[in-house]
Image: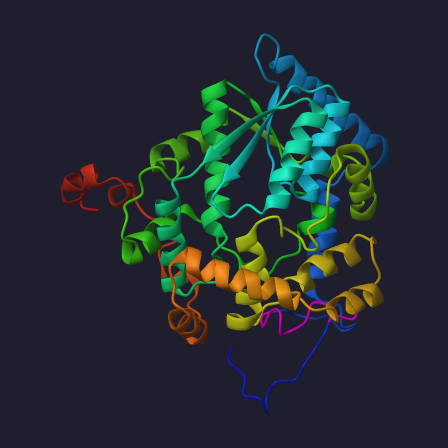
Amino acid sequence: MVFSKQDFIYRQCSISVMDNIADANISFDEKGICNYYYEYIKAEKEQVKKGIEGEKEFNKIIAQIKEDGKGKEYDCILGVSGGVDSTYLAHIAAKQNLRVLCVHFDNGWNSELAVMNIENIVNKCGFKLYTYVIDWNEFKDIQRSYFKANVIDIEAVTDIAIFSALDILCKQFKIKHIIDGRNVVTEVTLPPSWICKNPSNLRDIQSKFGTIPLKSYPLMSPIRRRIVAKTKPFQSWPILNYIPYEKKEAKKTIIEKLAWRDYGGKHYESVFTRFYQGYILPEKFKVDKRKAHLSNLIFSGQITKQEALEELQQPIYPTELFATDYEFAIKKLGFSNDEFQAYLKAPAIPHSNYALSISLFDEIPALKPFKKLLGK
């Protein structure tokens, strides 16, 4: 629903900093509490295990990972970005003496600090590092397609590739377990309208706007995706849901144990993510992603609403850093200043305007001749 300036009445959650600017579809109960609080409570109840129950589940998973890793080079695989969650998980895995293959997805946007943090992780934990380097020209072309499509979740280009790459490497190295840094207490709160990690959506957007066919981009074939979904040859474990996980304490630990250095923002280890979250989202889509991240921490009792409000008063992007990133990012993406400004002014298009589900006939061109025969 689109409101005129006269019709719009601002509302903010009585508990968190989520509001109807961040999400026009937000709802509130009679106490002014938003739907995201209740969604968090439900997710925490269903997915987070605390105390003795959490300890038992954690120990059970670690034992299973070690058992399945016997006779193999690695027990499990871990995607590392240099951020807090994956770094802390690496620290936990090292304490449990797991033999971890760390995988870093290099999409051409790493900050120097991220590279240094990742080097410290693998060196201090004694892990091996596999760097999955994507073909830059192909990756850039897909990112540009998302810009041309005017959809919000440009980060899907990276996220889809990361999880596909982990699946591919599990098969390559015969690894049965992925340890996953995603967790409820710091990052489950996210409006559905902000995200679309859909491979079919990516294929359709690239087919409409791309200039390079998908060749090296790590996207599982539709047949393999269906097979993996049914057979589950490997298991992904959200380990942080089974142990006490407090963001501030986790940062202190990895700073002390792994010489980790802070980026100043969630997922700001990537230059593109920093530019996307700090500038593109608020400028084009009127989204301040900090509202969701901070609200999640409020829900899990890690910060107060007042602390979140004070954080939101801080600049989302330091002026000097933005100036440097802006020039670097649009040049790297191949945009002129005028082209990029025109993109920012163009209306946003929902992901649903592009395919969210594509049949095998469309995804596998060789099958198209059989489509008519089967009456599809």
Q: Which residues are magenta?
A: 13-25
248 in relation to 237, above or below: below
Q: Residue at x 61, y 14 (%)?
A: 69
Q: Is residue 16 visible?
A: no
On the picture, is 46 further left or further right than 175?
right
**Residue 268 pos. (x, y %):** 62, 52
In depth, the one of 315 and 12 nearer the eye is: 315
Q: Number of callouts in the render?
A: 0
Q: How would you classify the magenta stretch by its main secondary structure?
A: loop
**Residue 361 pos. (x, y %):** 24, 42
Colouring scheme, one of rainbow, by chain, secondary structure, one colour: rainbow
18 inside magenta stretch: yes
**Residue 223 pos. (x, y %):** 34, 33
Q: Residue at x 55, y 21 (%)?
A: 176
On the picture, is 4 further left or further right than 47?
left
On the picture, is 370 further left or further right than 54?
left
